[in-house]
Amino acid sequence: MAPRQDSPFRSADMSMVQLYVSNEIGREVVTALGELGLCQFRDLNEDVSAFQRTFTQEIRRLDNVERQLRYFYTQMEKAGISLRKLDLDVERLSTPSTSEIDELSERSQKLEQRISALNDSYETLKKREGDLTEWRWVLREAGSFFDRAHGNVEEIRASTDDDDAPLLSDVEHNHSAPDAERSFSGMNIGFVAGVINRDRIGAFERILWRTLRGNLYMNQSEIPEPLIDPTNNEAINKNVFVIFAHGREILAKIRKISESMGADVYNVDENSDLRRDQINEVNNRLQDVQNVLRNTQATLEAELNQISQSLSAWMVLVTKEKAVYNTLNLFSYDRARRTLIAEGWCPTNDLPLIRSTLQDVTNRAGLSVPSIINEIRTNKKPPTYLKTNKFTEGFQTIVNAYGTATYQEVNPAMPVIVTFPFLFAVMFGDFGHAVIMLAAALAMIYWERSLKKVTFELFAMIFYGRYIALVMAVFSIFTGLIYNDVFSKSMTVFPSAWEFKKPDGFKDGTTVTATLNDHGYRYPFGLDWAWHGTDNDLLFSNSYKMKMSIILGWAHMTYSLCFSYINARHFKKPIDIWGNFIPGMIFFQSIFGYLVICIIYKWSVDWQAKGAEPPGLLNMLIYMFLQPGFIDKPLYPGQSAVQKALLLLAVIQVPILLFLKPYYLRWEHNRARGKGYRGIGETAHVSALDGDDETRPNGNSLDESDGVAMISQNIDEEHEEFEFSEVMIHQVIHTIEFCLNCVSHTASYLRLWALSLAHQQLSVVLWNMTLGNALATTGPLGVIMIVICFYMWFFLTIAILVCMEGTSAMLHSLRLAWVESFSKFAEFNGWPFQPFSFKSMLEESEDLTEYLAPERGCDLNCSLHDRPDSIGKHLVAAFHLEILQPHRSHQLVHRDLDSRHGDADLLDLAVGTVADRDAAHDQVGCHEMRDLLVGLFDFLASVVAVGLGVAHLGELLDGAEGALEGPFD
């Protein structure tokens, strides 16, 4: 039987295959399969340690090459040389041969030696340069010390007899000595000169003073320019010091203390002429060192610049080569036949492509022995492989964040493509806000190639879901038209079906009741714009949206239950149909399907013409359970009998849900064992008619009369023995959960009404607090207020109503998909298909982020890992409200007849103009996300500002006449 064609409705058919590959072309075969990305290999060497596997030496060699490449990258960062990153969308790397990898290894070894030698030479020269610079500063500063000291020789007492006497004394001695004899050597005074870190100078002085008990004379000065430390290229501030003391032992102590404090001591001559010669010598040596240093640095930078052009490609090649050998270590190696044996999973429909790839590799290698791939029949559960494209990838990620679908069950992502954005739109429904979202989504799709390189994490997440945002915006435009909402205002696209007639004796501020027209005209699409701004607008919209939420929730859960029937048929489990699906569907439809029918029937009846008061559906549902047969206010004839029958039908389904499946499985298990089929290690003889096991005395073998025993092979799978008690407990939990969830999940859909109401009211409040006040102000002040208030309104609309409210609605819609829908049919007991693929490996590798140009932002999986089994409680408290309250009489009550023409027509014009944004395209840079968004927002702001300005001007011109004759908002 030919395999079925792959479709997104179910996971692809998977096959376990066994490969026999010659050891000579093992690397080439794995490389070719890595480019395909269609095989997930099993580890056939689980009992072998990583150090004892076949290709451990090759991996160690590549680890060394990778270390060398990272060393080059570190040196480039240290030298400030930019790395040329590899763009995998533009550049393709050909598969290298083994000799090319060996050549890369040898070349990297030589380059490491050369870079290391140049780097050591550079650091040595830099250290020498620093030492000479410090010596020059010591000679320069010490000269001034000696000059001042020679001018004050009479203050220094030559103490040669008493070592305990202080070096500095207020009593002058030898003041009559001639100048020629006043040198330090003549007074037996020595000195130590050097350089020390400025941060340590205070501690250095204190240690010297306490150690030598004041027998020293110290001068120090700051070096004005910072000196560079060659080990880390950091600037360090240092001071020059000269310490005078007498006695060799004291000078030796000073040198030891200086060295322990990290100071560098330099030789300085007391004689000014010799000191001048020292300075000249130091300057000459410093100039020579700097010349050599510049040449060394130029050579090092030239080498690193050349490496920077290819380092990214080398790193990618080495990473891929390591992945190849790590995969080869999963294979079993037959040393006698020099053959590699591999096992793994691959899509069944891609087997011909894999065979042709293996044949191409064998032909290129010139081998006469072909590579063999065999399909294995196994009882192991295959992985789940769902193929996606750019459009479906985001929706599939939403599903995968909850769990991995079981192999071959209905893919929940298919209905999510429609239901997730539609339920979002029910809560977000505003035409104006949807147009802004649509413009942003289309912009991200239009400039997709350039924007996917943006590395800002928040934008990367939004960009990854650009197609989700597109569908959500399209559905929100539809619901915005249904609600007739655009920035909290209405659109007067069609004439209203309601008429406001001025009563006799009318005065300004009098309440007027609207009536439907007499010629049968009704508003053709969505809500009539005349409802906006009326006193009972909120009552009408609340009643409508609450009932609509119940209907949408019923439809959402009903089709989800239908998917459980499709899964049961596919897996050939008829007991799941008869024991779970049918009784569950009857139970659900007997209660909530009946409720939906009552809602629609109640909408279709003209209760005013009938002269009856519409009944409350909430009370009807409560009395249906608490007082079966009691009808407070009848909805239709025979209602009592119908509700009794439906309640009885729903109650009957509970024992069917509880007992049918467990007892059927028990009967089926006993029948199989009665025919001789036993579990692994089982020795009991059971008749299909027996209720209990009958253990035979000799249970170690089977007679021929006992039937034919099944020969099974344990393929590392855990075989679960049938336990009736466990099956029964599981079914009891399922039944209780299903019955309770029918109520709680239906109440959970009231979030559609709650968030829709919150979004609409926030939009109204924002308009009234900003542009509403500005439009009511006339004169020049009104123009200024319009400009200021418009930018406030537009910014807050984007930040609060589009971004924050949009995120809230998206999370609530996500919960309805995860909990209310998926729990009806999806098991999520699968494990994902993760093939050996170079493409996915390079995209997901964190070690290569410095070497690759960014392809796209992080997946949604970054933030959606946990299953939302407890994402808030259901809105049970909402049932305490009147969920399905009786209809009010369909009358529109307008608050103020003197309200002027609303901004509906002009806003409609303004929003309609948003679609024409060709003029803004030329102003947006493809490579600057900020310029793109700012330009888009400015254009939208300008268009809406023009519309509002025209609206304000129209109001000023209309005057009092417009107050009486204009349409009502």
Image: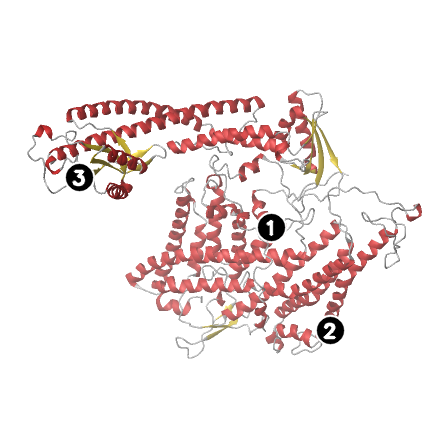
Q: In this image, 59 relative to 951: left or right?
A: right
- Pointer 1 residue: 399
Mark 2 or mark 3, whichever is nearer to me:
3
Residue 337 position by quadrant: top right
How far apart marks 2 and 1 lie (CA) works out to 40 Å
The image shows residue 25, relative to residue 436, as above or below, that is above
From mark 1 to mark 3, how far is it between C-alphas? 86 Å
Closer to the camera in the image, 524 or 849:
849
Locate residue 898: give its quadrant.
Answer: bottom left
Q: Which comes before the other along the chain, label 2 or label 1?
A: 1
Q: Which residue is mark 3?
A: 167
Characterize the local packing of mark 1: few (<14), some (14-19) or many (20 or more) Cα atoms within 10 angstroms.
Answer: many
- Marking on residue 39: none
Where does label 2 land, which residue? 644
State the image coordinates of residue 269 (x, y, percent, origin top left). Answer: 19, 27
Q: Is residue 559 visible?
A: no
Camera-near label (1 vs 3) is 3
**Quadrant the N terminus occupies:** top right
Q: Is residue 941 left or right of residue 284?
A: right
Q: CA distance from mark 2 to mark 3?
A: 117 Å
Number of other residues with Cα within 10 Å of mark 2, as a class: few under 14, some 14 to 19, many 20 or more: some
Q: Secondary structure at mark 3?
A: loop
Q: Amino acid at mark 2?
A: Lys
- Look at the numbered disc 1 and give the secondary structure of its residue: helix
- In the image, taking residue 858 as reference, residue 587 lies left or right, namely right
Inspect the image, locate mark 1, and give the three-letter code of the amino acid beneath it.
Answer: Val
Query: Residue at position x 44%, y 51% from top?
Result: 914
